[in-house]
Image: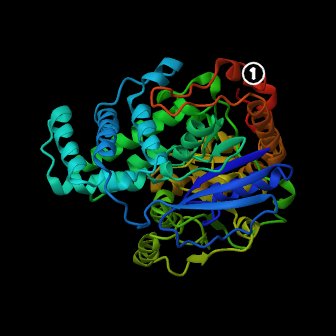
Amino acid sequence: MKIALVSEGTYPYAVGGVSTWCDQLIRGFPEYRWDMVALTVDGTEKPLWPAPDNLDSLQCIPVWGAGRPGREPAAAQADRFAAAYDTLLAAILTPPEIRSSATAVKQSRFLLGLRAVYDFAAAGGDPYAALTTNRSIRQLVDTARKLRDWDLPLAEAAYAADVLGHLLRPLTVPPPRCDLVHSSMNGLSMLVAMAAKWRDGTPVVLSEHGIYLRERYLEYVDSDAPPAVRTLLLGFFRSLAAAGYLIADVLAPHSDYNRRWQQQFGADPDRIWTMYNGVELAQFPVADGEPAEPTVVYLGRINPLKDVHTLIRAFARVVPRVRGARLRIFGAAGPGDEAYAASCRQLADDLGLSRVVTFEGSVESPVTAYHAGTVVTLTSISEGFPVAVVEAMACGRAMVCTNVGGVSEAVADAGFVVAPRDPLAVADALTKILTDHELRHRMAKTARARVTQWFTLADSLRAYRQVYEALAAQPQAAVAPQSQALPVPTVQRAARLRVIGRAAVAGAGGVA
């Protein structure tokens, strides 16, 4: 079997939970051949992961790279593109009622517009060049006035057109020919999957570690883009997320929390199977004892979504309550997060914590970090089903985490789950675990037991194998190149996949 795995901003150019999952997936099926399609910033990134033996190719699509300047379309091409763009803008600016059915797929204006843009690119057109012509910019201004009563300045329209041109780039690059496409997340990664489905009828599996759309909303809260442009781009992401749920043959969210979001945005519940992340237990042994000093450990990226500020503020409240307490922060800032990492260090200094809070940087083995802690914490404002939590639990560590994504589904009685952005709640939970030895040891024992029962890598891979083989057994229907002929995942395929059911995914979460 040949599988194309699609990532955005993660494997093989970054470390973290999604990258770990990608590597586990490829190495976990040595009998399959894999192609990797990685969406990156500008194409200058260097791989951080060694290529597995069964990885045949790595295709990098730089979403924000300059690329080669394209030529404006000829008159006939320009007319066809204008019609496609009109459909796309209507969907973005006036999103329809969310529904999940074959009819919804056929009637989705956004999918029709995307398909027309894909056809335009497949015929040799350059969507970026077409989007940034004076005609298309004026079309955006006129459509915004007509549908939303916006008086969009030309400069803002040109800015929005430039961004849309970059965002649509993954749709314009020919995808690998394969038996199945597995997108690691919704959003831009699904444009690659759509291109493969429209060209070859390739079935698509969509995983979601976090909720892509929710993270775009969080990202744009602090955006310096003009309000109208921000609304337009969020409309694009909202429409794209719903389209991804319609196009995917199987949705494999990594938590029930994500499952509920998917259904809210139109995903067919009969196509959803919760597939929890798993770990190899032998690689995460239970710690032999505890550190001499009461130590809180964080392991992860230094990133605003991880909200390390809240952790530092919480620890400032722990210090006077727990004699000798330390906070060790393991992990590094990714590209673009350097200023945030500096602000974390500055905050620790401002709170007088420079002697008890240490920034350890990257660590060769995560086990080293988990064993260095008395308790492990994660204070994110957005998560999917974080593998770091499961790894720490496998090492027999009690947890203090914020209630985001599927975190509570992992932790349960193995720690405390508190509200995000609440330093006092985090501090109270950390203090309780650090000072109540009997409770901490009971939670630590529960943590290892939960991972052993529910979150092993073997069970996770077994569930994916059944999904892959069920999809690959279905004949691929050729998709006509006309925009009206949108492919609809078949009822027969969905029916066959239902046999996987609860038994097949029990080890990956037990939800069918």
Q: How many labels does the image show?
A: 1
- Dot 1, how many residues are within 10 Å of its Cα: few (below 14), some (14-19), or many (20+)? few
Q: In this view, does 252 lie above or below 445?
A: above
Within the image, what quadrant is residue 109 found in?
top left
Residue type, mark 1 in image: Arg
Residue 249 vs residue 67: left or right? right
Residue 398 appears in the rendering: no
Residue ID at (80%, 35%): 469
Q: Pinpoint residue 310: horizontal percent, then vertical percent.
A: 46, 60
Residue hosting label 1: 496
Counting from the top left corner in percent of width and height, residue 338 is at: 45, 74
56 relative position to 401: left or right: right
Looking at the rendering, which quadrant does residue 463 occupy?
Answer: top right
Q: Which of 1 and 231 is in front in this view?
A: 1
Image spot of residue 371 (x, y percent)? 75, 66
Residue 124, image x, y percentages: 45, 51
Eyeballing the image, is 182 above or below 96?
below
Quarter of the picture holding the C terminus: top right
Foreground residue among 197 and 92: 197
Q: In which quarter of the image is residue 39?
A: bottom right
From the viewer's perspective, tell me whether residue 333 is left or right of residue 98: right
Q: Which residue is drawn at 58% across and 33% down?
A: 259
